[in-house]
Image (cartoon, rainbow, N blue to C red):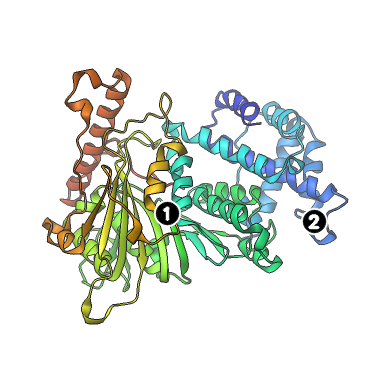
Amino acid sequence: MVAKLWNYCNVLRDNGLSTIEYVEQLSYLLFLKMADEIASDPFTENEAKEIVPADCNWKSLASLKGLELEIHYREILAELAKNPGTTLGTIFAKSQNRITEPSLLEKLVVDLIGREEWTIQGTDLKGDAYEGLLARGAEDTKTGAGQYFTPRALIDAIIDVMQPGPEDTITDPACGTGGFLIAAHHYIRKHHMQNLSRDQRLAMGAGRIWGNELVTGTARLAAMNMLLHGIGDADGPSLITVSDALAETPKKHASLVLANPPFGKKSAITVIGTDGKVDREDISYDRQDFRATTTNKQLNFLQHIMSLLEMNGRAAVVLPDNVLFEGGAGEKVRRRLLDEFDLHTILRLPTGIFYAGGVKANVLFFEKKPPRSGGVPNTTKLWVYDFRTAKHFTLKQHPLRRADLEEFVQAYLPGKPRTERKESERFKCFDYVELIARDKVNLDITWMRDPSLDDAESLLPPEVIAQEIIEDLQAALNEFAAIAEALGADVPADAETVEESTAS
């Protein structure tokens, strides 16, 4: 399915359609086709049949050709966008037909979407087909599609150590295309489905799993992706909200937060914390739950996730290196993270695994704990796993696989006391006293050296060396651009190669 649908994308490129726009157009048509299949199923309960009005359904579309087909398609998109707050409304919000050539639209409707029976293929197959399209779309770096996609292997490893359960409330405040939320739902179904009551099963798709996304088009992809994986109802409340997550204090809290917030500093927004400081931007958010004022998006998202967690809740968050060493607000946030939360594990990620270049990132694992008596910090030991040194990946020749992260998952000891962990060459433990004594509480901790730097016989293939040089240069450029902007300089748009690398 993926190959068939993707090959047609090459045809649509000639019609001026970008990769992300093509996947978006597919989401509209796939939804209409599946809604029609459900309505035509004699075993479907009556109340579930009418997902879309009869004059907007697939049959009304597939019965037309040429210009009439295009005109009716536009009418359907406009009509279905009139349901804000529902999954249907989220999927079709601000929708437009971007396939301007009627013959191309007809081929997509009749020959590709129309010839498949999507709902009888099984949830995993149709969901995986859509996920495959999103992954293909992420490879199109020219359109910025990769900024919304977190590598599936990394998501799966994070889910395996976090072990979400049916009792969890799970959210992602920057959900991209919904990868983390779907993986968490899949894990629960795989490991707990036999023991779930009917009410628990229904609750998973009725609000216990939810996400937020800033960009309307990306939220649309997330809502469709979740629906294809069996999460939520088409005419029920949307599980994906479209808003700026940093704009206000969370209205509800979660026991599990999984996130890959936007990378990059550029923003017209400053969040004013309790320290009262205001930076130079004209627009600002007043967040009394924040302790530090900064224009750094990642630090603000980290503070937001701290607020989003319920007591004893846990989080796994992908964040760039600057969060670990940046001074000023960065130091203030790290001190709070060590003192008021239990920051127990950091996974240092290698370069070459994200579709957006210049990304050097880590996964921070922490828990929200009640204050301890006598001002004793909640973090006692921080375990750092170095999966970066001597690890070399590329997106095509040597992509990251889930098996590559198996040693980390085993070392993490998911579900077991952390007192049973053992140190190894890549896994080291650091006491709170050591951490707080480091200059600016710098948590960018390294101790390994890449053997290929010392041994000529261990040299990497030229294409890997070239790719890592590019990654290093892009990462350095991003840091310099952020510093220049903080000093008041006007940074050219093309100087910020990685503005946003959301992931989910």
Q: Position of residue 287 (x, y in %)?
A: 33, 70
In the image, 452 versus 295, the foreground residue is 452
Residue drawn at (32%, 72%) of the image: 289
Instruction: Check residue 259 in the rendering and tell me which mark sits there, or answer none.
Output: 1
Q: Position of residue 326 (x, y in %)?
A: 19, 53
Residue drawn at (64%, 30%) of the image: 5
Earlier residue among tags 2 and 1: 2
Instruction: Check residue 23 in the rendering and tell me which mark sits there, or answer none.
Output: none
Q: Position of residue 320 (x, y in %)?
A: 30, 47
Kindly tell me whether residue 173 is visible in this rendering.
no
Q: Position of residue 352 (x, y in %)?
A: 35, 33
Callout 2 amino acid: Glu
Callout 1 amino acid: Ala
In the image, 474 versus 312, the foreground residue is 312
Whole-number angstrom distance, CA of label 2 to CA of label 1: 35 Å
In this rendering, which labeled residue sits more in front, label 2 or label 1? 1
In the image, 407 versus 315, the foreground residue is 407
SS assignment at label 1: strand
The residue at which mark 2 appears reads as 50
The N terminus appears in which quarter of the rendering?
top right
Mark 2 Cα-neighbour bin, 10 Å: few <14, some 14–19, many ≥20: some
Q: Are marks 2 and 1 in contact (CB under 8 Å)?
A: no
SS assignment at label 2: loop
Kindly tell me whether residue 209 is visible in this rendering.
yes
